Image (tube, rainbow, N blue to C red):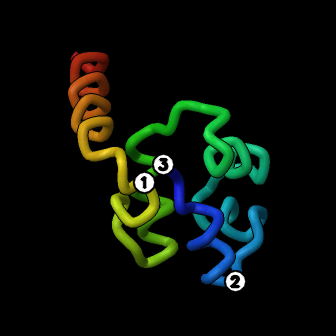
Amino acid sequence: MNNLKTLRDKSGYTLQELGDMCLMSKSSMWEIENRETKLRLDSAYKIAKVLGVSVYDIWPDTNETIETTILEEITQSI
């Protein structure tokens, strides 16, 4: 489940505006919103910060996914 479109619409931002504020392209935002790409943890936090919500408000079913992503990103950086 992904609440990004609902929260983005509620905030009044277009894909382009949200992308600009998150330093991401409009097409990247569309892919994230439509789950066409794997979301990076840093991107998730940028989007949540701009929207003024928690990552879990946007992606409520991702508690385990976020923990797995953190471990993957730490492992890759070693």
Q: Are marks 3 and 1 in contact (CB under 8 Å)?
A: no
Q: Is residue 7 above or below residue 4?
A: below
Residue ID at (62%, 82%): 10
Tell me the SS state at disc 3. helix
Q: Which mark, by number, is residue 59?
A: 1
Residue that appears at 36% across and 48% down: 61
Quick one: label 2 or label 3, which is nearer the N terminus? 2
Q: Amino acid at mark 2?
A: Gly
Residue 40 locus on image (x, y percent): 45, 38
Where does label 2 land, which residue? 12
Task: Give the quadrant of the C terminus.
Answer: top left
Q: Nearer the viewer, residue 24 or 8?
A: 8
- Residue drawn at x 78%, y 45% is 27
Name the residue that disc number 3 marks.
43
- The answer to whether 68 appears left or right of 48 in the picture is left
> Three-letter amino acid code at disc 3?
Ser
Image coordinates for residue 26, horizontal then vertical, percent: 77, 53
Residue under the image location 66 percent in, 67 percent down: 18
> Residue 70, how many percent across, how many down?
25, 34
Residue 32, compared with residue 75, is above or below; it is: below
Identify the amino acid type marked 1.
Answer: Trp
